[in-house]
Image (spheres, grey):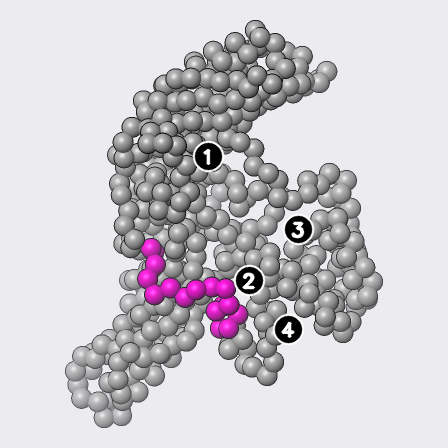
Amino acid sequence: MIKSIIIVFILINSSLFGQNLNNTEWIKINAERKDGSRIIDRLGTEERATKYYFKESTVLTSISEQYSLEQKYSITNNVLSIGDFITFKIDSISDIFLVITEMSNKGLPDDKINSFVFIKSDYLFDYLKQTQQLHIIGDSLIECDKLFSPVYKEDIANIFKSQLGYTKMNEQVSGYFIMTADGNIKNVQIETTNKLPKTEIEKTTNAIYSTSGSWILPPTPKPFLFKIDFTLNFNYTETFFAITFNFHKKEQIKYKVLTQQEVKEADNYFNDGRKFIKNSKFEKAVTEFEKCTSIDSLYLDAWYNLAFCYEEVGNKTLQCETLKKLKEMGQKEAEKLFFKTCQINETSISTVVSQADMVGHKIFTKSEIPVTYSGGDRKLNKLIKENLNTRLPLDQGAKSDTYKIIIRFIVRIDGTSYDFKPETKFGFGMEEEAIRLLKNIPTWNPAIQNGHKVNAYYRQMVIFDL
C-alpha cells in the first residue's frame, strides 16, 4: 500500500534503527561521491537504475528492471553486506529513506567513494510526483522510466530464448506494451519499421504476453495502467548468439564511447605523466596529461594532475582554467582549490572554504532528512559528557544549576562543520566551551533534500549540569 509523504520527514538515527528490511523494496534516487562530488565514470554509476528487494536473508538486485540476481545479505553494526564482496556503511535509515556509503579497505579519499540515497517503494510515487519526475498520461496511464516501473521477477531474456530459440539474426525490435494494475499484459505493440519476419514478431509478442503475473509493481494510490517501452536485440556471430531485452527508451549517451585501444592509450599517457612528476619534469608531464585528456575527457585524475603541473610551471591561467573545468564537472575538491587559488586572495583558508561552499549551494534551514551525528545520538551524548569541561563555568562564578546551551552551525555536504554561533547567553564561558567541543567533532551526516546531500543549519544542545 502506498504511503504519502509530507514536506518534512522524521529520521530514525542509524545507530538505533534495528529496522527489519525483510519484504521491503528500495529504489536509488541519488548517487554521488562521499564528499558531494558528481560521480563521473564510464560505468554509468550515477545514472544507472538500482533497486533492491530484501527478503528474510537474501536480497534481489535489479538488472535492467529484472530481479535476476539473488544474494545473501546481513546487517551487523550498521554495515550492510551483500554477497561476498559488497559492503555499505548505513549512514542513516528511516521509514522512507536509506542512505548508504561504499566501504573500502584501500584508504580511498572521499571523492572516490560512492554514496547512495534510496527511497522505499511505498513512498516513490509521491516523491516523484512532488519532484515532477512522474510521467502520468491522462488520469490512468503512467509512462514508465528507470525510476518508476514494474520489475520482472526473473531474467526475461530466458523467456525469449526459450520461445524464439536460436536464430541467425542481427536485428533490433522496438515497441511497447501496456500492463494492468494486477500485472497482466494488456496490449503489445511492435513498431512497423522492424525488419523482423512476421513469424518472429508473433513469437516476440507471445513471449511478452507470457510474462503476465510475474512482475513486481510499484505501489500507487489507485489502480494505474503502465506503459513500458522496450527494445529487443538479437546478436549473432559464428561463435556467439545472445538475446537482450532492454526496458524504456534508450537514453542519449552524454559522452564519447571509447574503444579499448583508446582506454589503453589514455592510461599509458597518464602513467607516463605520473613518472615525469616523480622526476620533477613538469613540462613533460603536462604534455602527457594533455594527450590523456584529449582522448578521455572524463579522466578526472589526469585533469587534477594537469592543474598541479600548470601550477609547478608557473602557468596560473591554465591552472585556473583546469580547476574551473573540474568544478563545472561537479568536483568539490577542485571547487575549493579554485576559490582558494583563483578568485580569493589574502583570505584565511577556513573563510575560503566557507565561501566556496556558499557559492551555488543553498544553506537549508529545514530539510527532508536533517543533520545527524555519524556515530548516533548515544555516542554523541557520551562524547559531549566525557569531553565537556564543566569546571570552567564554576571557576568563573556560575551558580550550581542546569544550563542548556544552544549552538547553531552549518554542516556541509561533506559532513564537516563551520560558522558556530551561540543562541543562548548564559555566559561564564559556557557558550565558548560548547563551541570548542563541537568544533572538535570530526564529521556529521549531512542533511538530505530531494535525494541530494545539502548544506544545512543545525542546532545542538549542550547541557552543563553544575
The residue mark sitting in front, 1 or 2, is 1
Look at 63% across and 11% down and name the residue there.
167
Mark 3–mark 4 distance (CA, rounded to whole Å): 22 Å
Location of residue 67 with respect to 165 vertically, above or below: below
C-alpha separation, residue under disc 2 versus residue under disc 3: 15 Å
Q: Which residue is mark 3?
A: 298
Tell me whether circle 1 and circle 3 mark residues in contact (CB < 8 Å): no
Q: Is residue 348 visible?
A: yes
For residue 325: magenta?
Answer: no
Q: Please state, as top left, top right, bottom left or bottom right, where the C terminus lies in the image.
A: bottom left
- Amino acid identity at mark 2: Lys
Query: Going 52% across and 22% down the picture, which residue do you hit?
Result: 175
- Secondary structure found at label 3: loop
- The residues tagged by marks 2 and 4 sit, at their Cα atoms, a distance apart of 15 Å
Location of residue 129 in the rendering, given as x and y in whole percent from the top left corner: 36, 43
Secondary structure under tag 4 reads: helix
Residue 273 as seen in the image, left or right of residue 4: right
Residue 364 is a magenta residue: yes
Residue stretch rendered in magenta on the structure? 354-369
Count neighbours of disc 1 (C-alpha within 10 A) and say few if under 14, some if 14 to 19, many if 20 or more: some
Tell which circle, 2 or 4, labels the residue nearer the N-terminal end: 2
Q: Specify the amino acid type for callout 1.
A: Asp
